Image: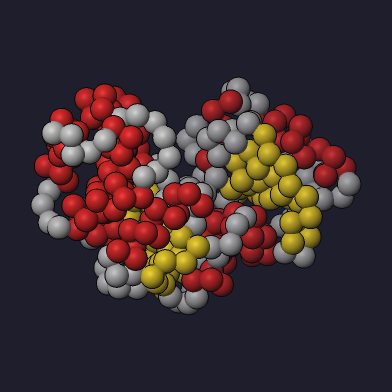
Amino acid sequence: MIGIDWGTTHLRAYRIAEDRVIERRESESGIMHVPAGGFPDVLRRAVADWIEAGDQQVLLAGMVGSRQGWVEARYVPCPAGPEEIGAAVIPMPFEGADVLLIPGLSAEDNAGVPEVMRGEETEIAGVMDAIGESGLTCMPGTHTKWVRIAQGRIAGFETYLSGEVFAALRDHTILGRMMTPGPVVESAFDRGLARARGGGHLLHHLFGVRTLGLMDRLAEAESASYLSGLLIGHEVSAALPVQVRVVLIGAPSLCALYARAIEACGGEAATALPEAAARGLARIGKAAPWS
C-alpha cells in the first residue's frame, strides 16, 4: 500500500508493507502549491514508480481533503476510531490505481461550538497502542489539538491557537520589537509558565512581556521564550483536566516545551514514536473498502 500524508506545504509518501515503511519520500508539493485540477498529476509524479512496481492501493490523508484540496471530504462525527474512519473513505478518480481519501473528524465543545480536524486523526490512529483504550493526547502546532480517547476511539477534542497567536504577537505587534531571535531560554520559558499558573488573565499577562523588558527585568533574548511560556502555560492549565498522562505527537522541540508545561502542572508527558502518520495510514488502510 502507498500512504500519502498531504498537507498544506508538503507531501510525504510512504511505501508500506505489512505495517512497515519500506520506503519514504517527501516533496514541497503541498496543496497550496498545486494548480487547479493538478492533483492527479502531482500524485502520479510522486509515486508513479511505486504504482508501476505493483503497489496499486493509495490512501490519502490530510489537507488534500479540505476545501482547498483535491476534493472536500465530509467530516465524520466523533466518537470515531480507525474502523469508522476507514469505512468512510472516499474513492477518487485515478487511472492505474485504487485511490481513497480519508475524511476529517468533527466534534463540539461543551458550549456546542464546532471543532474540526483533518490529518490529525490519521496520526492518532498510528499511536493508539501507546495511548491505550482511554487517555489524552496533545498535538502541539499552529493549531494545537487536545484529544480524548475512550474505548479505543476519538471521543472529542479541543483546539488552541497558541502557535498562531505566538507568531502573530512576535511578528506583528509591539511585543516583537523587544525580541531578538535565538534558541529557547528555558529559564525564561519557566518564568512564563509560572506567571500563567499563578492566576490572572492572559491579556493582562501579555502586557507584562513589554513592561518587564522596559524595566530591564527581561532580556530581549528571553522575551520570546517568556511569551511562549505564557501562552503554553495558559493553554495547558485550561486543557489538562486532572493530573494525567498525556501522549504528545509532533515536532520534538515543541513537544519538549509542552512536556515541560504538562509536568509543571502535575501531569505526566510521554512522546509518541515518530512517523505516526505512516502507521495510522496503515491501520486505517486495513479497514478501508478497497475495490
- Give the residue displayed 60% in from the left and 36% down from the top: 10
Residue 253 coordinates in the image, percent (x, y): 48, 49
- Residue 109 visible to the viewer: no
Q: Name the residue at the front extreme.
A: 216
Disc count in the image?
0
- Residue 7 visible to the viewer: yes
Residue 70 location, quadrant: top right
Quadrant in which the N terminus appears: bottom right
Residue 224 coordinates in the image, percent (x, y): 31, 37
Q: Is residue 75 above or below residue 216?
A: below
**Image color mode:** secondary structure
Q: Is residue 246 above or below residue 253?
A: below
Residue 183 coordinates in the image, percent (x, y): 43, 40
Between 265 and 82, the one nearer to me in the picture: 265
In the displayed structure, does residue 173 sit left or right of residue 31? left
Q: Name the residue at the right extreme.
A: 53
- Give the residue displayed 30% in from the left and 63% down from the top: 264
Between 43 and 96, the one nearer to me in the picture: 43
Residue 240 coordinates in the image, percent (x, y): 29, 64
In the displayed structure, does residue 45 sit left or right of residue 118? right
Quadrant in which the C terminus appears: bottom right
Residue 274 location, quadrant: bottom right
- Give the residue displayed 24% in from the left and 49% down from the top: 192
Between 57 and 224, the one nearer to me in the picture: 224
- Give the residue displayed 36% in from the left and 42% down from the top: 163
Residue 207 location, quadrant: top left
Between 185 and 238, the one nearer to me in the picture: 185
